[in-house]
Each structure stands twice: as C-alpha cells, then as structure tokens.
Image (cartoon, helix red, strand yellow):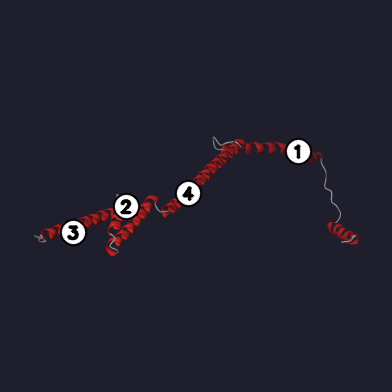
Amino acid sequence: MNEEKIKHLLAEADQRAGEPRFGPVSTAGVRRRACQRRLVWQGGPVAAAALVLVGMTLWAVGRRPGESQPPQRIASLEEQVRQLQAQNETTLKLVQEVLEKDRRDRRLAALEAQLASIPDPVKEIDRQVDKTAFILLYQADKLYKELNQTESAVRAYQEIIQLFPTNQWANVARERLSQIEQRRFNKSEGQKGVEKCEPRNV
C-alpha cells in the first residue's frame, strides 16, 4: 500500500465521521470520571491480591493432608530410583550367578560324558589278562592234543596256573593237568596188569 492510498482512505474516514460533537461538560461529570479512574487504579491491585489470596486458600484446602511438598517429593522419587537401581544390580548379579552355574554344570556334564567314554582301566587290564591266559591255554592244548608233546603241554599248563592263579582259564589248565595225570596213572596201571599177565619162562 502506498502513501497516496493511505491518505485517500483517511480522508474518506473523516468525511464519513463528520464533525466532532462536544456535549456539555460539568464539574460533577469530571469528578465522577476521576473517581471511577481512581477506583480502577486502586481496585486493580486489591482485586489481584484478593484473587491470589483466594487461589492460595483453594490450593491449601484442596491439598491432601500429608501430601509432600515438591522438594520432598523429588527426594522421595530419587530414593525410589536408588532402590530400583539397587534391585536391578541385585537381579543382574543373580542372573550372572545362575548363568555361571549353568555354564559350570554343562562343562561338568561334558567332562562326565567324556570320562564315561574312556574304558575303566581295571576292567581293561582284566580283559587283557583273560585274553592272554586264553591264548596260552590254546597253545598248551595244541601241544597236547595235536602235537602230542605232553611234557611241553604240562609245562605250559603249569605256567598258566602260576601266572594267572585266579583266572577261569587257570582252572581249565588244572583240569587238563588232572586229565594228563589220570591218563598217565591209567597207562601205568595198564602196563602193570600186562606184566602180571605175562607167563614166566621156566
């Protein structure tokens, strides 16, 4: 908007408003207006103070008994936060302990499984002893039954009994020696009988 338009609009507004009219002015009217202004100037602060007083009264009445003041409330909230932090730390510590125990239990279970897969050394030794005694008995039987080497077989059976006295194959070796002794006895008895039956030369 330029200056000319503004001037034109002001001129139009003056024409429409017309000439100013002044009414009669009396001293009573001036006093009344001055009194009104004084009341407004004096009453404003009083009304504001009254509003503040009413507001504080309503706030004091509306406040619950025992309600903490803002600083106390902040202190209470800070205490609750500290308690929550302490609970959180305790819970985390407990979780770490549970996880550590679980890790140890799993490690122990793995070691027990590994240990279970290792054969018992005592049982392994017993198995090897039993196997050795059986092989020696097998060789002694071969000497006695297949090769007719009775004296070598007797020595082999005696060796089994001497090396493995409590083994089951040592018992078998004892039985074989008993059989050999029985055959020798029967053979010697048979020869004596033959000698008795032979006629003497006269």
Mark 4 or 2, nearer chain start:
4
Q: Is residue 34 left or right of residue 55?
A: right
4 and 1 marks in contact (CB < 8 Å): no
The type of residue carrying mark 4 is Asp
Which label was assigned to residue 159?
A: 2
Mark 1 or 3, nearer chain start:
1
Measure how far apart labels 4 and 2 are at the Cα level: 56 Å
Q: Which residue is mark 1?
A: 41
Residue at position x 23%, y 57% in the image: 180
**Mark 4 residue crowding within 10 angstroms, few (<14) / some (14–19) / many (20+):** few
Measure how far apart labels 2 and 3 are at the Cα level: 25 Å
4 and 2 marks in contact (CB < 8 Å): no
Q: Which residue is mark 4?
A: 102
Disc 1 is placed on an element classified as helix
- Give percent across and percent down for residue 185: 18, 56
- Give percent across and percent down for residue 47: 69, 38
Q: Nearer the viewer, mark 2 or mark 1?
A: 2
Q: Which residue is mark 3?
A: 187
Task: Note whether 202 is above or below 27 in the view shown.
Answer: below
The type of residue carrying mark 2 is Glu
Measure how far apart labels 3 and 4 are at the Cα level: 77 Å
- Give percent across and percent down for residue 45: 72, 37
Instruction: Classify the position of the C terminus by image quarter.
Output: bottom left
User: Which is more toward the observer, 142 or 7?
Assistant: 142
Mark 3 or 4, nearer chain start:
4
Instruction: Classify the position of the N terminus by image quarter.
Output: bottom right
Mark 4 or 1, nearer chain start:
1
- Residue 32: quadrant of the picture: top right
- Give percent across and percent down for residue 152: 30, 57
Disc 4 is placed on an element classified as helix
Which label was assigned to residue 180?
A: none
